[in-house]
Amino acid sequence: IDETSKDERTLSRRYGRSKTGTRAQKKQVFVRGRRTSTEALLTLDGIVAATVVEGSMTQELFLEWLENIVVSLTVN
């Protein structure tokens, strides 16, 4: 079982370098965006179960997916 998440945040550095006595500056637009989380069950046969959730995966959602989808696949 593997989990990954992705959001649409702008990639930017928090720190920079500048000449002594001057402040490092960089102006840019920051975008937060929506987050999606993906869970997948990978076996020797490939990915056999997966789910995508908008927002962060909670323990409740994960356990529901695990019990209803993953366990049912292993029982059969």
Image (cartoon, rainbow, N blue to C red):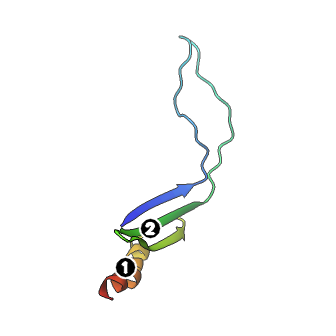
Q: For the N terminus, give its image quadrant.
A: bottom left
Contact, mark 2 vs mark 1 (Cβ under 8 Å): no
For residue 69, side relative to residue 27 (left or right): left
Residue at the spot of label 2: 39
Residue 70's disc number = 1
Question: Quick check: 40 left or right of 22?
Answer: left
Question: In the displayed structure, would residue 40 be above or below residue 9?
Answer: below
Q: CA distance from mark 2 to mark 1?
A: 11 Å
Question: Which percent across, then down, holds residue 19?
Answer: 56, 12
Mark identifier at residue 56: none
On the image, the x and y values in percent for residue 51 come to: 49, 73
* Percent x, y of residue 2: 38, 63
Which residue is at a point 36% across and 86% down the rendered structure image?
72
> On the rendered structure, is 22 left or right of 72?
right
The answer to which of 16 and 74 lies nearer the viewer is 74
Q: Can you name the residue that lies furthest to the top here?
A: 20
- SS at mark 2? strand
- 50 shown above or below 26: below
The percent coordinates of residue 73 (x first, y second) are 36, 83
